Image (cartoon, grey):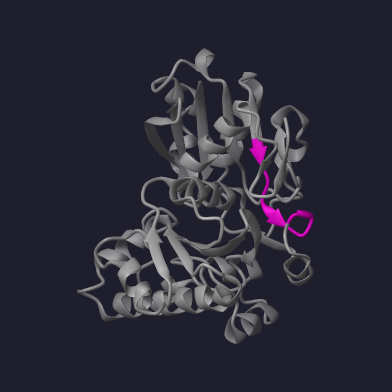
Amino acid sequence: MIVVGIDHGTSGITACVMENKTVKSIFKMKRTEINEKSFLKELEKQVNLNDIDLIGVCYSMGDGIDKITDIKRVENRGVINLEGIGKKIGGGTKVYDEIKSSNIPAIVIPGLHNGVKSMDERFNALFSHIASPEKISICYNAYKTFGFENFILSDISSNTVTLLIKDGKIFGGFDACVGAVGILHGPLDLELIRNIDADKITANEAFSKAGVVKVTDSYKGVEDTKFEIMNNYDKDEKCKLAVDSLVLSVSMEINSLMFLNSDKNVILAGSIGTWKNPSVSEMIKENIDGNVLVLNGESGAIGSAMIAEDILNGKKEILGIPVDF
């Protein structure tokens, strides 16, 4: 059995080829590359396309569907619209359309939004949207890797999204525009709200620069800003303050869910959550009274492949989310 998992991230598209539960290859295309190359031709360098049994696709916010759905039955790529969700480059749209046109079997993973009834109704009452589809994939990867039924998953990268899993189902959590900051994205504070009201900046532009990049003079685009900030942690005072502030913000978000986390398990993921020097996970551990572990690797792409594989093996529900395939 050969499956492919796709992580539609801020800086690019990552794909994982898995055969019989073993990761065979992982490759990443920057968003700027996708506009010049065919995703399927790049995938064909890794695996014969005719041998793929199922692709697990993540795309954008995933707020137009509430089940893991056969791509043939998904309208408008599974989204309501593409407005107000960060910088749009178009690479993910091209990948999605290539896959749908190819007739390779594929499922589309939804995001977490208030139409997903498996979550606690209080989170759905509070927030219209909680996470994009690849966060579900990361959670499933963590669930399969560590075997916990109860845990907090914090994915820290361009943005930070923190989710709570209770009894093997996603219970709720905080989206990138609500709680903790990431490198690029974050919630809007009073100054940004005033700038939006004064027509100096749109809300989407504010969100896209509300992460700890605002502390620095280090914006290098969606693909390279994190490297600029993290690699200068010991050399630049603003970069050090940015990372230390991110750690504080994420620690606060995790701790805010701990009273609902009976087993005190915390799993960190994402390019910043797994960053080694400085060790962001060790910094966060100092602020958390619990069992803090790290999910290394391309966790979103691998998780999407795990979802596809388990659906082929007959699973009808993933972390409480129904399967329509």
Q: Position of residue 155 (x, y in %)?
A: 48, 60
* Image quarter of the C terminus: top right
Q: Does the magenta stretch include residue 187?
A: no
Inspect this view and state whether residue 157 appears: no
Q: Where is residue 225 in the image (x, y as percent from the top left)?
A: 37, 61
Q: Where is residue 120 in the image (x, y as percent from the top left)?
A: 74, 64
14, above or below 122, in the image: above
Specify the segment rendered in magenta.
108-118
- In percent of the image, x 51 and y 20: which residue is there? 1
Left or right for 321, reference 291 = right
Left or right for 312, reference 157 = right
Residue 312 found in image quarter:
top right
Q: Is residue 115 magenta?
A: yes
- In percent of the image, x 78 and y 55: which residue is there? 117
Q: Nearer the viewer, residue 269 or 191?
A: 269
Main SS of the magenta part reads loop
241, above or below 112, in the image: below
Q: Where is residue 7 in the image (x, y as percent from the top left)?
A: 51, 43
260, above or below 35, in the image: below
